[in-house]
Amino acid sequence: MRRIGIVLAAAGLISVAGAGVAYTDSIDWGTYQVGDKRSGYTYAQPETRAMQDDDFENPGFLLMDQAATLWETPDGAAGKACVGCHGDVESLAGVGATYPVYFEPWGKMMTVEQRINQCRTEGMKADPWKWESDEMLGMTALVKHQSRGMPVNVSIDGPAKPFYEKGEAFYYERRGQLDLACANCHMDNAGLQLRANTLSQGMPNGFPTYRLKWQKVGSLHRRLRGCNDQVRAEPYERGSDEYVNLELFIMHRANGLPVETPAVRN
Amino acid sequence: MRKRPLLTAVALPLALVLAPALGAGGAAAEELVAYEVVEGAIPASLTGVPGDPEAGKAAAVHRQKGNCLACHAMPIPDQPFHGEVGPDLSAVGSYLSEGELRLRLVDSKKINPETSMPGFYKVEGLHRVAEKFRGKPILTAQEVEDVVAYLLTLKGN
């Protein structure tokens, strides 16, 4: 499971060289920067980056270890395990980098979490996992981790287009008592301090992410609820169409940045 | 470094009278005081009660009230981490009048519709406000007066 010094080695070195530099535009961020796009990694404190870079320090790996066991454990009425259909989890390399994807039977987009539950309920005849359960977070992380270092590569062509447009509209719409859109913070003001937080571009390429503030691994949709709460807006449910479409928009915005799952952030 | 974008560039309707906004739902929601905008300012006090600069400073710092430090630097050195999203306010009382400050606090989008600064005394034209805050302004009318009074004391060095 734990592979040290995997990809991203170049950028890993930078976090050592950059120790003590809180935030600067002059650092060569390696693959964490593609043109103007920057991963949240490049806005994080050196200690936070070091924690992500060391698989033994990164708490996300604990959850993935548990998920690796679940991968091989039969569950549900069909008596099947993930490994029965997919073989080694490594066979999913590249897959996580393309989600959300259009899912024909639903006529809408599907996230990795939803794909996992689809496998469970349809393939295994097992109960779905709750969105923010350790099982779901660990398995989603394990699946996306197989693409670590690969560029996010989400398609918005064909049937995905209208869902992308909904996500885009959400991103630019002001909301809440504070009347702020995602774009106000993560496009207009990225790199600036919002009190103690350095605003990043709000890139989702590291989720599920271990957040120091949460002391826990959390899903992207948990983060989205947090960003809605901050502006005193009514959040949506995890897995709602609104957040799935928003995930499509921001994942596509992150195209080209490396998958970092499980990332570590403030 | 003080940034001062666009503020003077936007012409305002000479006298824009706003109907009192009615709070939608929530027992504690009360009617907002009506005010008149005159040439980029709200010249008249919202309450008629003079603002208290000390109370205004406290409301500006309070995270559940003004939380101004999220976005602005202010001459309050005992508070860590001042924001950078808006301009430094250390001398704002030396170049904006009382009425100009009042309008910027009440609804700065009347000056710059694109601004990220929230309107602290408005309840209309907002989208998906969490139930707890629906129909309520961020600051009360008197808190606005207090913060204005505090800002007027900020004259720089």
Image (spheres, coloured by chain):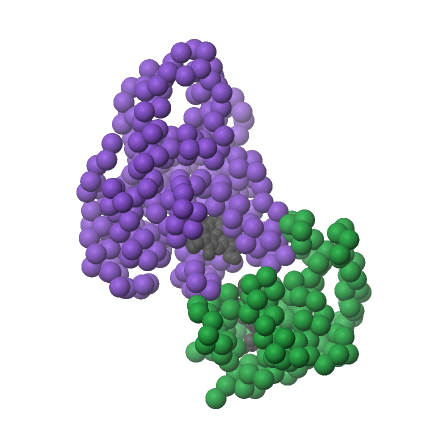
Chain colours: A purple, B green
> How many marks on residues?
0
Q: Is residue A144 visible?
A: no
Q: Position of residue A30 (x, y in %)?
A: 25, 52
Asked if A258 appears above or below B107 in the picture, the reply is above
Q: Residue at x 54, y 86 (%)?
A: B155
Q: Residue at x 76, y 75 (%)?
A: B47
Q: Is residue A66 visible?
A: yes
Q: Is residue A253 left or right of residue A260?
A: right
Q: Position of residue A12 (x, y in %)?
A: 22, 50
Q: Residue at x 67, y 71 (%)?
A: B143
Asked if B50 appears above or below A136 in the picture, the reply is below
Q: Residue at x 77, y 79 (%)?
A: B48
Which quarter shows the N terminus of chain B?
Answer: bottom left
Q: Is residue B16 left or right of residue A74?
A: right
Q: Position of residue B149 (x, y in %)?
A: 64, 80
Name the residue furthest bottom: B157
Q: Is residue A234 left or right of residue A6?
A: right
Name the residue furthest top: A78
Q: Position of residue A195 (x, y in %)?
A: 46, 64
Asked if A130 appears above or below B28 in the picture, the reply is above
Give the quadrant of residue A97.
top left
